[in-house]
Amino acid sequence: MKFGKIDNPEVVDFVLPPDHKDNKLVLEKSKKGKPNIYIGCAKWNKSDLKNFYPKGTKDELAYYSTQFNSIELNATFYNNFPLETIDSWHTKTPEGFRFFPKLHQGISHWKRLKDAEQPTSVYLDHISHLEEKLGMLFLQMPDNFGPKNWEVLRDYLEVWPSGFPLALELRHSGWYDGSWDSNELYAQLEKKNITHIITDTAGRRDIMHMRLTTPTAFIRYNGANVDSDYSRLDDWMDRLKLWADQGIENIYFFVHQNHEEASPLLSAYLIEKVNKEFETDIKIPHNPNASKQIGLF
């Protein structure tokens, strides 16, 4: 994920903002128990995850899904895949694996949610072929989609079908800088049970809102290929433990890097900590060429 990339991440203050005061109210309505946790990368192709695949790997997704329990599926933002392809994703991945697909850019960036009923319907019809392996869809709006577009966003979310769990990522600072009453947004998301994505990236600290709207934490974490990527994950573990104590039901955490080949290393580090803290048994991905990647940091 190149969004928020800067040339000097070592000077950024990566301290997480304080927890939002209303999160306790959201989480007190949740079902108590151990959270469902899915951690993965954003892509599975060999050109991005260099050195991750054993020599001779013929099917990248089939191997990836033996190492991770989920994928943040950005490919569906750029392409409308035929049903045969989506069916093959379902077939070649194991039981328990989950896809978290991004809505197509035709809906979010070309239509900007206006008159988007038909492309949304087509998209959902196709992506539903993932069946029980469909996790949570997510809608990412462009940087210039700000509060002046509130009514368009509200109306689109109002008719979103409840059978498809949805998360929303907003990238315009006006949603969070106090120039607009963000409580309208939060109320709509809570009403429709739509998750509010938290995006942690170096160059856009202005959109680190820390406001949950459902008992699900959907985090898009963008490392900068520097040593602090690991200490940042330590800070996230503290926040996830806080939310778990308060009743979070689902944790969806997807790791991006400016150089994606380091994503499995960061993911493995996080998974090991999660397993220890939450007494889970999430597979820690094996990287056959990890020693070759040390220089990335």
Image (cartoon, grey):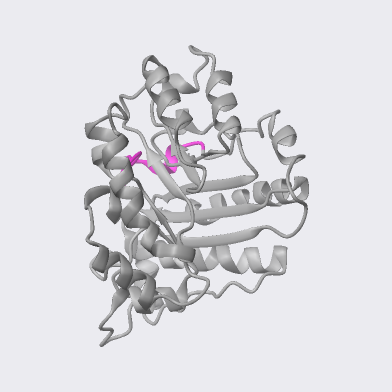
Q: Is residue 243 above or below residue 66?
A: above
Residue 52 belongs to magenta span = no
Q: Residue furthest top?
A: 179
Residue 36 visible, this angle:
yes
Residue 7 belongs to magenta span = yes
Q: Is residue 24 above or below residue 150?
A: below
Q: Which residues are magenta?
A: 1-13
Residue at 57%, 66% in the rendered image: 271
Residue at 50%, 40% in the rendered image: 197
Residue 258 visible, this angle:
no
Residue 55 at x, y percent in the picture: 28, 86
Quadrant containing the C terminus in the rendered view: bottom left
Residue 62 at x, y percent in the picture: 35, 78
Front residue of this view, candidates 288 and 210: 210
Q: Is residue 36 above or below residue 220?
A: below
Residue 31 at x, y percent in the picture: 75, 50
Front residue of this view, candidates 21 and 6: 21
- The quadrant in which residue 126 appears is bottom left
Tally of numbered discs: 0
Front residue of this view, candidates 283 and 116: 116
Residue at 62%, 53% in the rendered image: 250
Residue 224 at x, y percent in the picture: 39, 50
126 horizontally vs 248: left or right: left
Majority secondary structure of the magenta segment?
loop
Front residue of this view, candidates 288 and 37: 37
227 horizontally vs 187: left or right: left
- The quadrant in which residue 282 appears is bottom right
Q: Residue furthest bottom?
A: 56
